[in-house]
Image: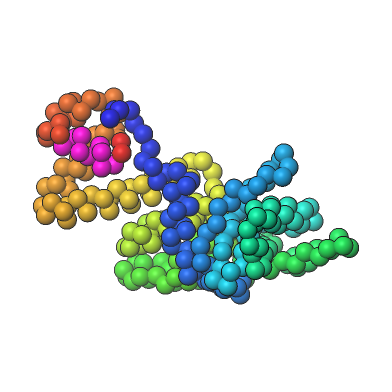
Amino acid sequence: MSNNKREITYHNKDVLSKILAENFKEKSLKVYGIDVPKIKQILPTNLPQIQVNEMRIDNLFLLEDGSIAIIDYESDVKWEDHLKYLNYIVRILERYKKEEMPKQIRMIVIYTADVEKAPGEFSAGCLTLKMEQAFLSKIDSETVQEEIGEKLEHGLPLSDDELMKLIILPLTHKGKEKKKQAVKEAVELAKKIADKEEKTFVLSGILVFADKIIDSETAKYIKEVIRMTQVAELLLEEGRREGRQEGLILSGKIFRVVRERSDFTNEKIAEEVGCSVEEVESTRKMFDI
């Protein structure tokens, strides 16, 4: 295996999407103020391209009643956004033209705390676009953060609703700078979640939902926390399999040296850690590094 430093596979967007897809099942959007059936699964957002300047859809869900929910996030109100929504709908219909048409397409717009009201319909005469809206300005950011923080400080598990609120928490603040700070605070809260799967779910959700306001440095930090959460779980699992603490400690040492000294050969790493080359190779294979 190459000694070059490589990112672990779950840095990839596809893997983050998989994490969200697995954990969004049966979650409710009611905590955001949207009264629709629970989520059944996440659908791929690579819709058919019908114009050169293809626009990216934020989220696409299949709900339990068979309807499809398009979810877009906005921090202001612009009439031309309605053209974007219509484009989304046409692209979804294009995807299903050779299959059974979806029962219903829901256009859901979640407004950050910067927007307190917006028109729920857009009419062009021959057609009318109806939107289901959520205004995050109605969520008490400070209260939610305090309640979640207090539970985590006492080692208590979070409910599904609280996990969903933590994911969206940065968008409940007004202004770009406050949102950026809120992202960092939400990540610090998420790091305290004991359940590794729930922690990864929340961190991945923050990264995906707030991608429009997260700078590259913060995004890199969140990915690193996700990666270390996964690494810790793998190390613990190895320790359980081997039935000894030594295996856990040794793998941790090897992993650290590999990450810090990507120029080292397996032989040099083994010499540095004080282990066999085979143990170095095994650790590299485990973490794909």
Please say if 41 is above or below 16: below
Please name the predominant secondary structure of the magenta segment in the image: helix
Q: Residue at x 28, y 30 (%)?
A: 1
Residue extending furthest toward the front:
98
Q: Position of residue 223 (x, y in %)?
A: 42, 46
Please say if 159 is above or below 185: below
286 part of magenta stretch: yes
**Foreground of the two, 69 or 273:** 69
Q: Which residues are magenta?
A: 279-287
Q: Relative to 239, is 161 on the left or the right?
A: right
Q: Position of residue 289 (x, y in %)?
A: 30, 36
Q: Position of residue 129 (x, y in %)?
A: 77, 64
Q: Position of residue 199 (x, y in %)?
A: 38, 59
**Foreground of the two, 100 or 247:** 100
Q: Residue at x 48, y 52 (%)?
A: 17
Q: Residue at x 29, y 24 (%)?
A: 263
